[in-house]
Amino acid sequence: MENDLITGLIKQFKYYKTVGDKTLDQLTFDEMTWQFNDTSNSISIIVKHIVGNMFSRWTNFLTEDGEKSWRQRDQEFEASYANKDELISAWESGWKCLFDAIEPLKNDDLNTIVYIRNERHLVSEAIFRQLGHYSYHIGQMAHIGKMLKDNVWESLSIPKGNSRAYNEEKFSKEKKHVRDDS
């Protein structure tokens, strides 16, 4: 397949989006706005930051610096969503911007030069940078969600104590490529 690398990267972004989706699905808006203290971020603020970053990085990805002059990064760390629907709508819009930018790419595009804050990156480096950034913050969201929900948290991966059964089920099947799960 001509776009194996791009396909794999898209799959990874979709995986982390799903982790975020499953976290947000389990929480009320009040839980999303909870902060441990004044210097920590709520899930709502983390979402706002991720979305702001996505619009800045992925708008005109191949032709403009990834840090847009119109971005107000400091404001991303101020709570402003009025309700869960508004937060989810912003979350979905950010992901749409990302996927609209990377889905048309071809493997040859990975060696193209782009800039983030006037620093030169290969497209591949810029994509990996963002994959790491988003997975870091989505992990924070899941951790906060798990703390808030305590014993009613629905695991986002293999639930504690179920590794053996999970692996037995996986190894009882024929080998396949990870993309076959899409």
Image (spheres, helix red, strand yellow):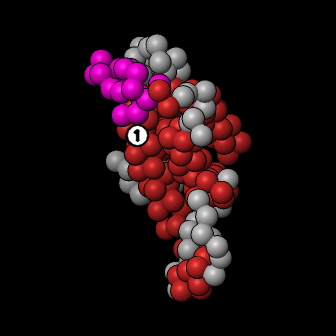
Q: Which residue is more in the foreground, 147 or 120?
A: 120
Left or right: residue 19 versus residue 114 is right
**Residue 174 in the image, given as x and y percentages of width and height:** 64, 73
**Secondary element type, mark 1:** helix
Span highlighted in magenta in the image: 109-125
Left or right: residue 93 versus residue 107 is right
Asked if residue 176 is among those painted magenta in the image, a careful observer would answer: no
Q: Is the residue 58 above or below the residue 19 in the image?
A: above
Q: Residue at x 46, y 56 (%)?
A: 139
**Residue 90 in the image, given as x and y percentages of width and height:** 63, 35
Q: Which residue is drawn at 65% across and 76% down?
A: 173
Quadrant in the rendering for residue 127: top left
Asked if residue 117 is among those painted magenta in the image, a careful observer would answer: yes
Quadrant in the rendering for residue 171: bottom right
Q: Which residue is drawn at 53% across and 38% down?
A: 6
- Is residue 72 visible in this depiction of the protein? no
Q: Quadrant of the N terminus?
A: top right
Identity of the residue furthest to the front in this view:
1
Residue identified by numbered label 1: 128
Q: Is the residue 159 above or below the residue 112 in the image?
A: below
Q: Residue at x 54, y 41 (%)?
A: 4
- Is residue 150 visible in this depiction of the protein? yes
Identity of the residue furthest to the right in this view:
85
Left or right: residue 162 versus residue 35 is right
**Residue 111 in the image, given as x and y percentages of width and height:** 39, 26
**Residue 155 in the image, given as x and y percentages of width and height:** 58, 71
Q: Which amino acid does label 1 sit on?
A: Phe
Q: Residues within 10 Å of mark 1 (few under 14, many from 20)?
A: few
